[in-house]
Image (cartoon, grey):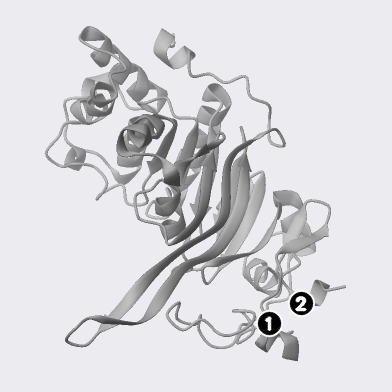
Amino acid sequence: MASPQLEATRSTAPAAGGDTLLRVEDLCKHYPIRRGVFSRTVGSVRAVDGVSFDVRRGETLGLVGESGCGKTTLARAILRLTDVTSGRVTFDGVSVLDLGNEEMRRLRKRMQIIFQDPYGSLNPRLTVGSMIAEAIKIHRLAAGDAVRARVVELLDRVGIPAEYMNRYPHEFSGGQRQRIGIARALAVSPELVIADEPVSALDVSIQAQIINLLKDLQEALGLTYLFIAHDLGVVEYISDRVAVMYLGRIVELADAVDLYRDPKHPYTQALLSAVPSLDPGKRRSRILLPGDIPSPANVPKGCAFHTRCPQAMSICREQTPVFKEVAPGHRTACWLYDK
């Protein structure tokens, strides 16, 4: 039987396609490059370079891209775990970047993150129970015996026996640690959960368990997910919509079904061609991209992908394409669709 505290977090929000919960507008995070005795700024690493998207209440937006493309930096910038160079983040109508410390502290109850590394994200000096209870006490969500009851309820919800609450992180497997990380994120009854590659460090069989757990929790608690990953198979399974990121920018955004069936951007086409399939009807001709992804400290002029794109044109080398709708609900940044 679910506790009153957890029952209160169940949402009556509409399914994907409803109102916007999170809006990111032209977000940039540039790290200065300093050299010399006087540490003069000689350039910048453009980790996130003008990203815009919405996350609808109750949906899962998948964010995919190669390692180093800026996915984790984007997640941390949204939550203000790192400073932002420019842009705007709006959560449920509130401008996140304009909030003071106390206002931001209150908002953090509604926005939480599940970290990638289940080994490094848990404090080895705290028991599982005290780790989850800490968040509850800090935000004054319960006191006394109610704290322990809430911890037991959360552990049960993620599949960890209550009698394990006095154990330390090193006594658990990787999958169990990630379940504990999920319980910790849920402790403050958030509306938005950013899952930063939550299964990439786990075995394949354990990945499926964690993904199914996240889907069950979303249905039970009305959660909204920004799900970050580089495994396209996992993203296809869990996501309502998918955004593809390359070198600090989103190059394509569409419903998951549409994007996997008919990818528009050459980069997305190359990514999907690498996904193995046992169904002969779904196999794609392999697209091999030449060279390596450029450094975010030296982003190519024009379209950042033109140095590897098999369909690059002269305009791609000179002008940055506009991120626009090329089909209903399907947006991409590519000169191939300039009409």
User: Residue 199: horizontal and vertical position, in percent?
Assistant: 43, 49
- Tell whether 122 sits left or right of 272: left
Would you say residue 197 is visible in this rendering?
A: no
Would you say residue 250 is visible in this rendering?
A: yes
The quadrant in which the N terminus is found is top left
Q: Check if mark 2's residue and mark 1's residue have beta carbons within 8 Å.
A: yes
Residue 41 versus residue 159 in the image, above or below: below
The answer to which image quadrant residue 218 occupies is: top right
How far apart in space, not on screen, are marks 2 and 1 (Cα)? 9 Å
171 and 105: which is toward the camera: 105
162 and 203: which is toward the camera: 162
Residue type pointed to by label 1? Gln
Q: Residue furthest right?
A: 339
Residue 135 versus residue 40 in the image, above or below: above
Badge 2: few (under 14), some or many (20 or more) residues near its Cα, within 10 Å?
Answer: some
Residue 131 versus residue 314 in the image, above or below: above
The first of marks 2 and 1 along the sequence is: 1
- Tell whether 319 sits left or right of 125: right
Eye-nearest disc, 2 or 1: 1
Q: Residue furthest left?
A: 125
Q: Which of the numbered marks, if any, corresponds to residue 335?
A: 2
User: Residue 307: horizontal and vertical position, in percent?
Assistant: 60, 87
User: Residue 80: horizontal and vertical position, in percent?
Assistant: 38, 48
User: Residue 256: horizontal and vertical position, in percent?
Assistant: 70, 50
Q: Which of the numbered marks, if any, corresponds to residue 319?
A: 1
Badge 1: few (under 14), some or many (20 or more) residues near its Cα, within 10 Å?
Answer: few
Residue type pointed to by label 2? Trp
